Image: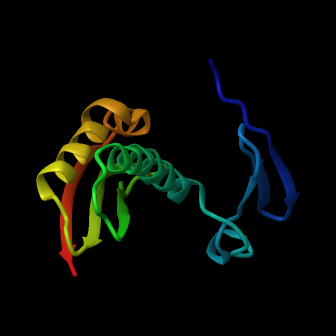
Amino acid sequence: MSHKVTTSWIENMQFESTNPSGGTIRIDAGPENGGDNKGLRPKALMLSALAGCSGLDVASLIKKMRLDVADFKIETEGLLTDADPATYHTVIVEYHFYGANLDEAKLKKAVDLSIEKYCGVMDMFKEFAEVKTSIHYHKE
């Protein structure tokens, strides 16, 4: 199995990239790097991929475990090295769950399964960065 995307130059610093399942995303640089701020930044897209991968795992497990969760979000931050090319040396992933009847033990199990077993993007990140995770429960 493989994934293949095609990334095409639009103009200036803008590119459009396909996704194997359909859809496209626009990539651009900020004005400080000659771009027009009309797309997502490549390194930040890596953080989105990480959150999306783990989020899909956790959402699936929430459904399978029949957990009562009103809302769920993941905040991801990448800390960059000072040397060029700047790369992520540390990545912080914070899972936030909202609801009146949160089962903290089962939600922790769902997050742990994603981190340790299911999320391939998380596994790749661990090859080049320290990944720090935390879970926050917001009971309404």
Going by the image, does 76 lie left or right of 21?
left
Give the residue at the far bottom of this rendering: 140
Going by the image, does 13 lie left or right of 134?
right
Q: Nearer the viewer, residue 60 or 125?
A: 60
Q: How many numbered circles does the render carry?
A: 0
Quadrant the C terminus occupies: bottom left
- Colouring mode (rainbow / by chain / secondary structure / one colour): rainbow
Q: Nearer the viewer, residue 69 or 46?
A: 69
Q: Is residue 7 above or below residue 120?
A: below
Q: Residue 57's image quarter?
A: top left
Please tell me which residue is depicted at 69% across the width and 67% down the height of the picture: 39
Residue 125 position, x and y percent, is 37, 39
Going by the image, does 72 lie left or right of 99?
right
Give the residue at the far front of this rendering: 66
Please tell me which residue is depicted at 45% across the width and 45% down the height of the picture: 53
Residue 15 position, x and y percent, is 78, 56
Give the residue at the far left of this rendering: 105
Q: Is residue 45 above or below residue 7?
A: below
Q: Residue 137's image quarter?
A: bottom left
Residue 134 position, x and y percent, is 19, 58
Q: Nearer the viewer, residue 82 or 39?
A: 39
Please tell me which residue is depicted at 35% across the width and 71% down the height of the picture: 70
Please tell me which residue is depicted at 59% across the width and 54% down the height of the picture: 42
Q: Is residue 93 above or below residue 22?
A: below
Q: Residue 102's image quarter?
A: bottom left
